[in-house]
Amino acid sequence: MSEWNSLYDAILTGDDKTATAVTEEALEKGAEPLELVNQYMVPAMDEVGKRFEEEEYFIPEMLLSARAMERSLALIQPRLAASGAKPIGRVAIGTVKGDQHDIGKNLVRSMLQGGGFEVYDLGMDVPHEKFIEAIQEKDVNIVCLSTLLTTTMPSMKTIIDNIQQAGLRDRVKVMVGGAPITPEFADQIGADCYGDSAYSAVKLARNLISA
Amino acid sequence: MHSGRRPFKFNCESMRLKLISCEIFYREICYAVSRSINQVDVEFFPKGLHDIGAEKMRGRLQDALQNVDGAYYDAVLLGYALCNNGVAGLQSNGIPLIIPRAHDCITLFLGSKERYLEIFNQNSGVYYETSGWLERGEELSRDLQPISIQNQLGLNMTYQELVEKYGEDNARYLYEQLGDLTRHYTKCTYIEMGVEPDGRFEQSARKKAGERGWEFEKISGDMGLIQRLVDGPWNGEEFLVVPPGHRAAASYDASILTVEKIQS
C-alpha cells in the first residue's frame, strides 16, 4: 500500500475533492478498482471509525470522510460491477414507521458503504412491508432498523415478527439502533444485535456476515 | 420545615404530595396544584434533561427522589414521561412513586396517551408548541449544554462555527446533514391548555411555523391528566405506581411503563 496513499489520506481527512481527483487519476492509470477499495478506502474508513471511538473524531468529521468515500466509490462502482466483484454483504436500512429522523440512519448507511457493503436505503418512516420486500427482491443479508423515539420502538418488534411469519427469518440478520434502543431491548424483540454507533454497526455487520 | 410524622395515607381524601417536575409544565402544574384537594409541594427541574442521556437524567431525578422526606409525604409524583428512557430505573424511596404512562410531554398536554397515539399515527412529523416551550425556549440551560449528547457527538454547532472549523463548502454540507433534527417535519401544532393569559403564545407559534414553512394548527389541550396526577387516586391505566422496593422500567408496549422488583 503506497501508490495511492493520497486516496487514503484524502478520505481520512474528509477531503472529497482530492479523493475524487486521485480516484480518477488512479483509474485512468489502470489501477485495479477492487484494490483501490480494499487497500485504501476501506482502511481509511476503518481509521475514521477508530478515531471516532477514541473521541478524536466527531460526527462532522465522520460525515465528511463518508462523503469523500461515497463520491470516490461512485466513480469506481461501474467498473467494479463490470468486473463482477461482489460486495461483502447486502443491507437494507431504514427508520421504522412513524420515525422522521434520519441523521443517524444516514450515517450508518455511509459507514456501511464505506465498509464494503451494498446498501439499499429505504429512507425514513418506512412501512413494515418494505423491509420484507427488500429481503425478497434484493436478497439482502442484513436488515438495519433505526428510530429516535420510544413511541416507535414497538414497530421494530412488529417488523421482526413479520419477517418471521413470512418465513424469511433464516435468510437475514436484524440489527437495531437509535437513541432509545438498548441491548436488552434488542434481545427482547429477537434482533440479532444492537449497534451503539455508526462504526460499531460496520464491525457488527462484518461479524454477522462471517458468522 | 416539616415536622411530625403522619400516618401513611394512600388513596385517602387529602394527601401531602411531593411533585418533581420538568419546568416545561410550569404553568399547567401551578394551575393544577392550585385547584387540587391535596397539598402538593413542587420542585421544578430544567427542561431538556432527556438531552443529557438516560443515565444522567435518571441520576439527577434519583438524587431528587432520595431527598424526599418519606415520613412527611404520602407519595411522590413525577411530572415526567418515559422521556427517552430517562425515568426507567427510578426507585421510590420508601413511599409510592407515581409516573404518568406517557412517552413524552405531549401526552401530558393532550390528556391521554391514546389521544397522542392517534394524532401521532396521523402525522409523526409534527413540532409541538406550548406556552412552556415557547417562553422557555429550545436552548438547553448553561449547565446542561456541555454534557448534552449533541455536544458529545459534535452536533451542537451553529453554521458559523461549522464554517470556522471546516470551511464554507464543508459547512454547507454538514449543516444540510446535521443542521436540524426537525428538518423533515411538516407541521407545527400549538396546544392551547386554557391557562394562557391571552393569544401571545399562539401568535408566537404561528410566527415560528411561518418561518419554518410548516403548516400551522391549533388544538385544545386537556388538563385532565395533569390534574389527575396531582389529585390521585392513580388508576393503573394512566399511571404507573412504583411501590417501595421496586423500580420503574420501560415496557415497550402500549402500557409504556412497568415495574420491576429490586433484587436485594
Image (cartoon, coloured by chain):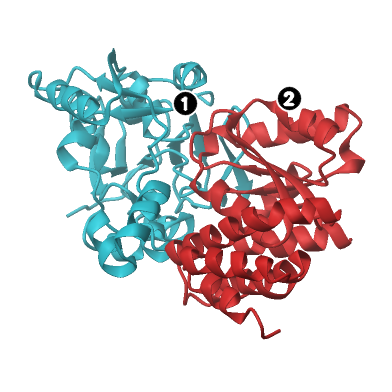
Chain colours: A red, B cyan
* Residue B19 x %, y %: 30, 42
State the image coordinates of residue B238 (x, y, percent, origin top left). Answer: 48, 25
Distance from the alpha carbon under mark 2 to that under mark 1: 19 Å
Can residue B112 be seen by looking at this rendering?
Answer: yes
Mark 2 — on which chain does it sit? A
**Is disc 1 placed on a helix, strand or loop?**
loop
Local packing at callout 2 (Cα closer than 10 Å; few below 14, some 14-19, many 20+) is few
Query: Residue drawn 89% across and 61% down?
Result: A211
Location of the C terminus of chain B (image quadrant)? bottom right
Name the amino acid, label 1: Ser
Q: Nearer the viewer, residue B176 or B6?
A: B176
Q: Amino acid at mark 2?
A: Glu
Q: Which residue is mark 2?
A: A129
Is residue A147 shown left or right of residue B141?
Answer: right
Residue at the spot of label 1: B124
Residue A57: percent from left, percent from top: 47, 72
Chain for mark 1? Answer: B
